Amino acid sequence: MELRAAGSADHDRTDLKAAVFDLDGTLIDTEPRNREMWARMFAANGIPHDEALIASFAGRRGREVLAELLHLFPGRTVEDLFHEVVSYETGPDMPPVQPVPGAVELVRALHAGGVPLAVVTSGVRRYAEGLLDELGIKGLLDVLVTADDVANGKPDPEGFLAACDALDVAPRDALGFEDAPAGVAAVKAAGMTCVGITTTQPAAALAAADRVVADMTEVDLRVWGLPGTG
């Protein structure tokens, strides 16, 4: 069921010109695997942790999270810890990743309609390109902004502003899709309209979004004047 956030002036915009997507949790459900990677890193180092702590990392750059936690790991560096977390990604017993329902179809519909498309992710470029290849949509995107391309990660709007600039579209004319509170905050700080996707967080955590949906099958692009599904 689609939910409308109260008090947003952008609900009724019917002239949006571009779409900008987060990647993890928005186009592809990597969150179970990502959470397991963090859990294994904490466990391997004997650091107490819980699900709430790990959930708070959603949508953020790994190195920035680790910089905040570095005091828990005496003698370690951010880069050392980052590589340890990443090393768990390819374990044979890690949770599989799956496309978010309706995501690939939505991107293809937008591309077919001539809508400029971008992805803004907290992941590094190599990682992001691998997932986009797995989804089969990398070639449909006009712009990819990764953690390698910006100085400040979400909730800072830098990535979304960079994407809009590269697309030559004003932020107020772009529709952003996000699944994490940090991402929603970044989209709104950029001045964009935001759709929150509850693949990894409850609707209440995404209340700052203009609309909240369960997954991409609930998105009707015609609401914003964009060609696509509905």
Image (cartoon, rainbow, N blue to C red):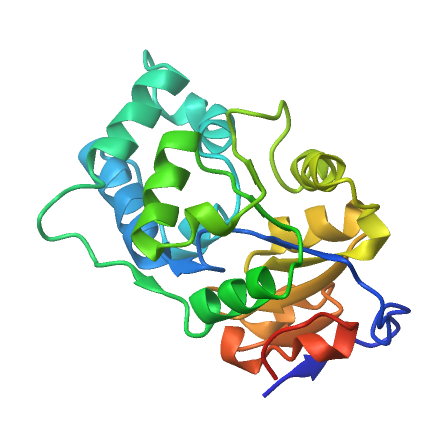
In the image, residue 208 sits, relative to residue 87, either above or below, namely below
Residue drawn at (39%, 26%), measured in percent from left and top? Answer: 72
Q: Residue furthest top?
A: 75
Can residue 207 be seen from the camera position used here? yes
Residue lying at the far left of the rendered structure: 92
Residue visible at 52% across and 30% down? 147
Quarter placement of the N terminus: bottom right
Residue 215 appearing in the image: no
Q: Quadrant of the C terminus?
A: bottom right
- Residue 136 vs 68, above or below: the answer is below
- Is residue 74 rendered to the left or right of residue 194? left
Residue toward you, 49 or 40: 40
Rendered location of residue 63, percent (x, y): 46, 27
Quadrant assignment, res 155: top right
Please count the marks in the image.
Answer: 0
Left or right of 92: which side holds 95? right
**Residue occupying image coordinates x 91% and y 69%:** 9
User: In the image, residue 179 lies at what x, y percent?
Assistant: 55, 60
Residue sitting at x 32%, y 11%: 75
Residue 180, picture quadrant? bottom right
In the visual, does 33 lie left or right of 116?
left
The percent coordinates of residue 187 (x first, y second) are 71, 51
